[in-house]
Structure formats: structure tokens, C-alpha cells
Amino acid sequence: MRIMLAAILSATLALPAFGGEAEIRSAQSAIDGQLKALLADDGAAAYSYAAPNIKRIFPTVEAFMGMVTNGYAPVRRPKTYAFGKVEETGPTSIIQQVLIVGPDGKDYEAVYTLELQPDGTHKITGCSLRASNALTI
């Protein structure tokens, strides 16, 4: 009985603790909106998806776009992208993997962090990018 209880408890703890699909869709919508804005060269729209912590570091659209252009070329100009794994790291925070084919034709993994804002939207608090030889969805 203890083994079965431990197995059930372990399986339950391994499940994501999302409040629902709406949170996932909200986070993915923010990322998708920013990527589409970047592709459309709409810096103001892309910047609007940034959380306050990012806006403090990059206080203008120009500074933000310079950072993205110089440090995140696959995010700035993805050929294609798809959402991968998603994880809730707290009651208001989400980590979302995005699989990207960059402008150079190579595969990349972008890991976005997002926070739920007081207005009910998710904003992007960070993005880490790495080249990848074998991506999994």
C-alpha cells in the first residue's frame, strides 16, 4: 500500500500545476505577438510584450531593439518557430520553450520566462537562447 501511495504521490507531483490552458495560451500569445512584431520590424509592438524588469534595463524601444538585433538574431528573424515544453514555476510565472529555425537555417532553442502582470496579461521577463543540434518538442 505504501508503494502504491508513493507512486500516486510521485505521479501527481510530476504533473504541471497550471491554473488552466488559458495561462498557457496567454503566455504563448505574448511570445507569438513579440516574434510577429519583430518580423514586421515593429519595434514598439515588440517592446510592448517586455515586462517591467526588461524595460528598466532597456528603457527605450531603440535600446531594446539593438539588444535583440545584436544578441538574438534567431529570435529577431526566425524562419520558423514552434512552441515546445512549458512549465509553471510559480503561481504567476511560466517558462516556455520555443524551437526556432534561425535566419542561418540552424536550429535554436529559446527559453522564455514570463510573469503574469496585474492587468492579467503575461509579459516576457527574459529569454535565453542556445544553438541546438537535436531539439525535442
Image (cartoon, rainbow, N blue to C red):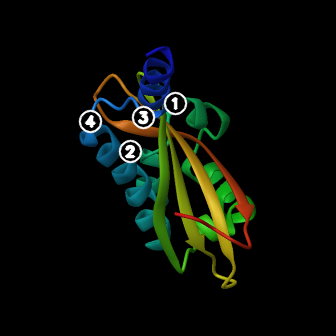
Name the mark nearer the viewer: 3 or 2: 3
Name the mark nearer the viewer: 1 or 2: 2
**Residue position for label 4:** 20
Name the mark nearer the viewer: 3 or 4: 3
**Between 34 and 92, the one nearer to me in the picture:** 92
Please indicate whether residue 21 sits to the left or right of residue 117 in the image: left
Tag 3: Cα neighbours inside 10 Å, few (<14), some, or many (≥20)? Answer: few
| Residue for point 34% across, 52% down | 29
Give residue 16's mark.
Answer: 3
- Quarter of the image holding residue 101? bottom right
Residue type indicated by callout 2: Ala
Q: Position of residue 35 (x, y in %)?
A: 47, 63
Give residue 27's mark.
Answer: 2
**Residue position for label 1:** 52
Give residue 86's mark.
Answer: none
Q: Is residue 103 above or below residue 127?
A: below
Name the mark nearer the viewer: 1 or 3: 3
Residue type indicated by callout 3: Pro
| Residue for point 55% across, 50% down | 61
Please indicate whether residue 117 sits to the left or right of residue 38 in the image: left
Q: Earlier in the sequence, mark 1 or mark 3?
A: 3
Q: Is residue 15 above or below residue 71?
A: above
For numbered disc 1, what is the local secondary structure? helix
For numbered disc 4, what is the local secondary structure? loop
Measure the C-alpha gap from mark 3 to mark 2: 15 Å
